[in-house]
Image (tube, rainbow, N blue to C red):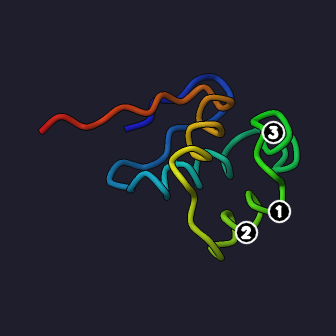
Amino acid sequence: MATSNRRLHSPPRGLNLVEEVRQAILNCVETEYRVAKESGVAQPILNRFLRGERGISLETAAKVCQYLGLHLAPIRR
């Protein structure tokens, strides 16, 4: 699961990774353009992801999460 820092609010519990990343971007104080530019993700890709028109690769999610200060880690069962 992802953990948050000062830039955003934590997403509600029970969301999957895709929804957690989407909510983290939407709750971020930065603009969509800024998140895309600073994370190295193409803005049209990020925009289509946020609108639900496409998924997100693990590589892209990792870039966005790194910029937002989130940590991706496997869940131990």
- Report the residue at 83% width, 55% height from top: 43
Which of pointers 2 and 3 lies earlier in the amino acid sequence?
Answer: 3
Q: Give the camera-side residue of 20 and 8.
A: 20
Residue 21 to residue 52: above or below: above
| Quarter of the image with the N terminus in it | top left
Residue 42 to residue 34: above or below: below
| Quarter of the image with the C terminus in it | top left
Residue 12 to residue 40: above or below: below
Horizontal placement of 51 versus 43: left or right?
left
**Dot 2: few (<14), some (14–19), or many (≥20) neighbours within 10 Å?**
few
Horizontal placement of 49 versus 58: left or right?
right
Which mark is nearer the camera, 1 or 3? Answer: 1
According to the picture, the residue beneath numbered tag 3 turns out to be 30
- Residue 48, numbered label: 2
Quarter assignment of residue 55: bottom right
Q: Is disc 2 placed on a helix, strand or loop?
A: helix
**Dot 1: few (<14), some (14–19), or many (≥20) neighbours within 10 Å?**
few
Q: Give the camera-side residue of 64 and 32.
A: 64
- Report the residue at 32% width, 54% height from top: 14
Q: Is disc 1 placed on a helix, strand or loop?
A: helix
Q: Is disc 3 placed on a helix, strand or loop?
A: loop
Is there CB contact under 8 Å for labels 1 and 2? yes
Which of pointers 1 and 3 lies earlier in the amino acid sequence?
Answer: 3
According to the picture, the residue beneath numbered tag 1 turns out to be 44
Spatial CA span between label 1 and label 3: 16 Å
- Report the residue at 39% width, 56% height from top: 15
Residue 60 to residue 54: above or below: above
